[in-house]
Image (cartoon, grey):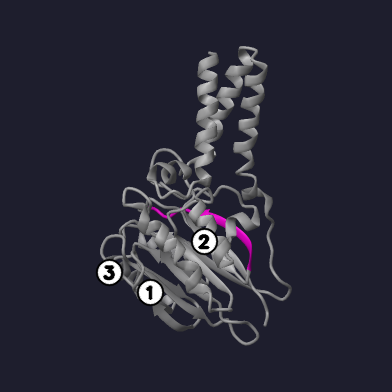
Amino acid sequence: MRSLGWLATLTGLAWGATRYGNSGNQLVAVPAAFVPFAIVPAVVGAGLLAGVRSRWGTAAGVLVVLLVGATQVPLYAGSPSGPVNARPLTVLTLNMEFGLADANALVAAAVHEGADVVALEEMTPEALDRLNAAGMAGAFPYSIVAPGAGAGGVGLFSRHPLLGAGTAHEWVLGAVSASVDLGAGYPAPRVFAVHVPAPWPQHDGKWRAQLASIPPLLSADRRPVVMAGDFNSTMDHEPFRAMLRDGGLSDAATSTGAGWLRTFPADRAFPPLIAIDHVLTRGAGASEVHTVTVHGTDHRGIVAVVQVPHQ
């Protein structure tokens, strides 16, 4: 029992430590996505060592439990924020899983949530046709779309006029952006729909390079920024946290204290396990974040209310 206790404790410690890894090794990136679950072997190890009355072992086990638990505290420590006289902008983002998401359910969810902007990933040409048939163009008359086969299509749909729309062709899986005209007195925030390649099963070099490309992309733009999409990253991935720091970005779920908003996989008999879909902000505060379920896709969507400051 003592040996099992130490094995479980060390497993929890090593697993938790992967959130600080930046080695470019998939053996670090993959387990880092599941760091919240490292608390399980940590607790088991502490319990087993306590059971065999090992004082030093119990102390070490409890310390590992505290260390692993502390990594998740920031997810709950934030609070809703927003400047005085702010204009709320409700953003919904969803990965459509190769365009298979139920278009009618998606449009209905966007309308029900009162979305101002909808950012979609893995949007195929056929999915775009189904969305328009379901009423997307009527509910969100302004759009910039770059549909593509498989996982490569993205789209941005808005209730408000879109200005300076553009497509980022250098993105592996696609990205589109536009400034959203919120009317006189408010800056037009730059809103992005993005899809970052995964660190696995693909080589994680593209994942790291794409994340690292985001801060330079934003460096010359002083307007409020909203980036929504599938980042294939959790808050336990150091390259993702580095991107947030370098880009001056905040994760809406973390900044509001919404906690561990797991979004993938959403089509199994068990609940989603990891939080890889995000709404990120800069120059604007999030006041509310939650997930939304749309049938036909393996992702839950994220809905965030972003408070855009008055000029």
What residue is shown at x 42% (from left), y 54% (from top)?
Answer: 232
Q: Measuring from the top left, give residue 1's x and y in whole percent.
A: 53, 13
Residue type beneath disc 2: Met
Question: At numbered mark 1, what does the secondary structure look like: helix, strand or loop?
Answer: loop
Marks 2,1: beta carbons within 8 A: no
Depth check, mark 2 against mark 1: the one in front is: 2
Depth check, mark 3 against mark 2: the one in front is: 2
Q: CA distance from mark 1 to mark 3?
A: 18 Å
What residue is shown at x 53% (from left), y 79% (from top)?
Answer: 220
Q: Measuring from the top left, give residue 225's x and y in whole percent.
A: 55, 72
Image-based side of 197 in relation to 150, left or right: right
Residue type beneath disc 3: Pro
Marks 3,2: beta carbons within 8 A: no
What residue is shown at x 44% (from left), y 41% (from top)?
Answer: 31
Count all numbered tags in the image, as a single digit. Answer: 3
Q: Which residue is mark 3?
A: 125
Q: Which residue is mark 1?
A: 168
Q: Is residue 190 magenta?
A: no
Question: Dot 3, how many residues are within 10 Å of its Cα: few (below 14), some (14-19), or many (20+)?
Answer: some
Q: CA distance from mark 2 to mark 1?
A: 18 Å
